[in-house]
Image (cartoon, helix red, strand yellow):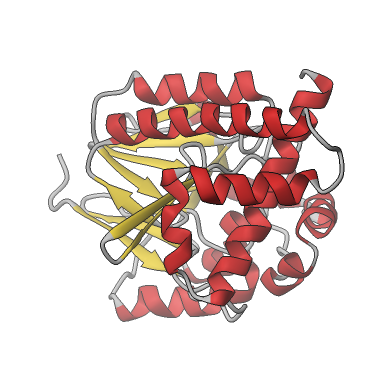
Amino acid sequence: MALADDCRLIEIKQQYPGFDHFIGSWLYRGDVNLLVDVGPACSAGRFVESLVRMDVDRVDYILLTHIHIDHAGGLAECLEHFPMARVICHNKGVRHLVDPSRLWDGSLEVLRGIAEAYGPPKPVREELFIPHTESPMKELMIIETPGHAPHHLSFSFRRHLFAGEAAGNYYSLGDRDYLRPATPPKFFMEVFLASLDKLSALEDQHICYTHFGEAQSSCRMVRRFRAQVLRWHDMIREEMSGDSNDVLTRCLERLLKEDDDLRAYETMDRDMQEREAFFIINSIKGYIDFLQTGR
């Protein structure tokens, strides 16, 4: 077992309006030091400074849940400061971090100005990666959880489940909490639900979200999230069966009104609401594409 079980969420502060308390990295310290996700390129320097202030002088492994630029964009700079670290990543994602040109182009297409704020990722040398199928960590359970991204991984280590965005985005806002899907196009609902079933089958443990928080019962949270995914499917399908005009707006308004897991939206400041509305609409687009194509 670990010498000391120290698992904490580090906020990776952003300068983009509304993006406070949104992006984080999980630090596990003990007989092995792990980082789970490292944030975008724009904030990599600030993130490394946070680790230095915490007296982190060694990182053994960086675990990437997926290669989206808000999770992996700062990887090159982190590795410059922690050259002893090796990166465990989905084997099919490695090439996009060695040469991130296609990853950057795709990010600009989907995220537009947000991608520009995150900044382009720098290339990383291939020898620094360990494909997820070759992980040397015996205690690390790696679960393939595609859905939010095709090559998404979740990690279970010493009763901590690092779920990336496979189990949604979860925040605590005062005495309320907030849970929403991250289902951008291309969204394959059956694949997404199958991943949730894998997480539900694990032992109950501490669940750690990159966006942005934690909960003590992974089983309870995954069940709750699965119900939300199905609820959104039904609501969005009903709105699509009506007037084809402004379907995105109607879906957004209905979800905010009827989904209790989004109720804390009304307590957010204006910039946070704009951020969340952008990502909710992006997720609605994923559902609409799935419902229109049936796959």
Residue 187 visible (yes or no): no
Q: Quadrant of residue 75?
A: bottom right
Vertical placement of 81 versus 135: above or below? below
Residue 206 or residue 40, whichever sits in front: 206
Residue 93 visible (yes or no): yes
Residue 242 or residue 60, whichever sits in front: 242
Q: Taking 177 as reference, is 7 left or right? A: left
Find residue 273 and report its horizontal and vertical position in percent. Answer: 56, 67
Q: Taking 38 as reference, is 94 left or right? A: right
Vertical placement of 157 versus 263: above or below? above
x 23%, y 29%: residue: 204
Find residue 250 and report its horizontal and vertical position in percent. Answer: 71, 47
Q: Assign the C terminus to one quadrant of the image.
A: top right
Q: Going by the picture, which residue comes out furthest to the front?
A: 243
- Please give the count of numbered marks on the rendered protein: 0
Q: Taking 146 as reference, is 281 left or right? A: right
Q: Assign the N terminus to one quadrant of the image.
A: top left
Find residue 292 and report its horizontal and vertical position in percent. Answer: 82, 25
Residue 62 or residue 257, whichever sits in front: 257
x 54%, y 51%: residue: 256
Find residue 23 and report its horizontal and vertical position in percent. Answer: 49, 63
Q: Taking 35 as reference, is 203 left or right? A: left
x 79%, y 57%: residue: 104
